[in-house]
Image (cartoon, rainbow, N blue to C red):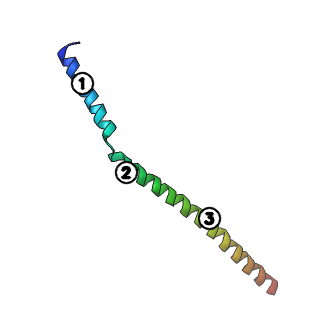
């Protein structure tokens, strides 16, 4: 191996080790997972509330139809 190739290989190894120690993307991933969890909880809550509201309006519509 020539000296230039050895320095390039050492430079590559140094960069790979730096990437291994770099944790800057970890925060972004944690926030993304948190946002995804919040979105799922909101979706389930809206679905449940929608079903409840639909049931209430169906009861009211049935009562009004009985009166007419």
Residue at 46% in and 57% down: 35
Q: Is residue 29 left or right of residue 58?
A: left
| SS for dot 1 | helix
Q: Earlier in the sequence, mark 1 or mark 2?
A: 1
Q: Which residue is mark 2?
A: 27
The residue at which mark 1 appears reads as 10
Please identify the quarter of the rendering in which residue 18 is found. Answer: top left
Residue at left offset 25%, top offset 30%: 14
Residue 68 shows up from this direction: no
Tell me the CA gap for discs 2 and 3. Answer: 30 Å
Mark 3 lies on a secondary structure that is: helix
Q: Does residue 58 appear in the picture of this structure?
A: yes
Q: Quadrant of the N terminus?
A: top left
Badge 3 or badge 1: first in the primary sequence = 1
What residue is disc 3 on? 47
Is disc 2 surrounded by few (<14), some (14 to 19) or many (20+) residues within 10 Å? few
């Amino acid at each position: 191996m020539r000296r230039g190739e050895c320095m390039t290989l050492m430079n590559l190894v140094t960069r790979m080790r730096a990437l291994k120690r770099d944790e800057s993307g970890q925060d972004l991933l944690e926030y993304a997972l948190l946002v995804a969890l919040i979105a799922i909880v909101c979706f389930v809550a809206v679905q449940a509330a929608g079903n409840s509201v639909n049931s209430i309006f169906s009861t009211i519509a049935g009562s009004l139809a009985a009166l007419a």
